[in-house]
Amino acid sequence: MITQIMYIAPNSVDGLLWGLKNFDGIETDLRLSKNHEIFIHHDPFLEDGRYLSDLSSAQLSELGIPKLSDFFNLPTVKDYADKGKRFLLELKPNCNGKKSVVFEIRQRFRESFDQVVETSGVNPESITIISFSEVLLDAFVDTYKCVPLLPSLNECESLKITRWRYLKLMGKFLSNRLPSYMKYAKKKGYHGVYFAREYIMGGLSRWHGSYSSKIALAKELELELGTNTGSASKDPVYPELLRVTDDTSIFPRHASEGEGKIIAHRGTGTKGVHVEKL
C-alpha cells in the first residue's frame, strides 16, 4: 500500500488547526490590510514585492491569504480555546519602512481585533498578544495578556538586515539584561516576557545559577517566561518556560503537568509539515 503524503503550509488555516490539535497552542502573525482588516501573514510583503498594507481585503482574500476573522469564526477554534489551548498572536507593524506608521495603525489594529474576538466568541483568556513593538502592545494591554518579545527588533528599520543593523541587534542581545527587563515589564502591566531562543539567557545558562534565578524572579513577579527552543530536543532543557517550537516533525507534543506549554510556531513550524493523507 502506497502512503500518500500531504503538505500543510505554515500560517494557513489548515496549518493552525493542525497545530492546535497536536500541541498546547499555536503562534501566528497578524497584519492589517489597506482597509484595516486583520490577515495572517508573516512577511510585510508578498513574493512579488507588494506590501500587504497596500492591498485591500478583497485582493488579499483572492490571493488566498487567510483572514483572522475567518479562522476565529470556525466552531473548532472556539472549542480549542474553551479547552485551554493557547493562541499566541504576534502583531506586525505593516510599516513599509516608516516607523511613524506604527503609531498611526495601533488603534485601528485594536478596534479590528476586538471586533473579531467579540464576533467569534473565542475566550480572550486563551489569547496572548505578542510583539517586538511595545507601541502596538500598549494599545492592547488594558484588556488582553500582552507579552513583549526580546530583543526589541524594529521591523520598520530592519526589513533589510545590513551588517550595521546586525551589530546593533547583537548589541541589544548583550545589553538588554533579562532580570531588569522583567521588572520593567511588570510595571508596564505585561503578562510575561518571551525571548528569541535561549541565547539571551546565556549559552551556559542551563549549567549555572542564572537560569534558576531568572525562573525564581519570574515566579516572584508573576510573569510568564517563554522562548523559541527551535527543536524538540531543547524542550526538556527548559521545562518551566513556555516553549515555541519550529520542530513539528515529532507530534503530538504536549507539556507535562506543571510545565510551560509547547506552542507550534506558525501552526506547523516555519517550513510547514508533511503528514500522511487521511
Image: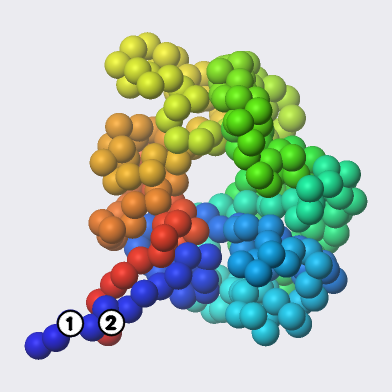
Q: Position of residue 276 (x, y in %)?
A: 25, 77
Residue lying furthest left: 1
Q: Which residue is mark 1?
A: 3
Residue lying furthest top: 209
Q: In the rendered structure, are the residues bearing label 2 and label 1 in contact, judged by CB atoms less than 8 Å apart?
A: yes
Q: Which residue is mark 2?
A: 277
Q: Quadrant of the C terminus?
A: bottom left
Q: Position of residue 52 (x, y in %)?
A: 73, 66
Identify the residue shown where x is 74% and y is 63%.
51
Tell me the number on the disc at residue 32: none
The structure's colour scheme is rainbow
Q: Mark 1 Cα within 10 Å, few/some/many (few <14, many 20+)?
A: few
State which quadrant residue 73 falls in.
Answer: bottom right
Identify the residue shown where x is 38% and y is 44%.
230
Total numbered circles? 2
Identify the residue shown where x is 72% and y is 74%.
119
Q: Is residue 116 visible?
A: yes
Amino acid type, callout 2: Lys
Residue lying furthest bottom: 1
Residue 143 in the image: above or below residue 218? below
Mark 2 or mark 1: name the one nearer the start of the chain: 1
With 78 as the anchor, is 114 left or right in this view?
A: right
Q: Secondary structure at mark 1?
A: loop
Identify the residue shown where x is 31% and y is 38%.
234
Amino acid type, callout 1: Thr
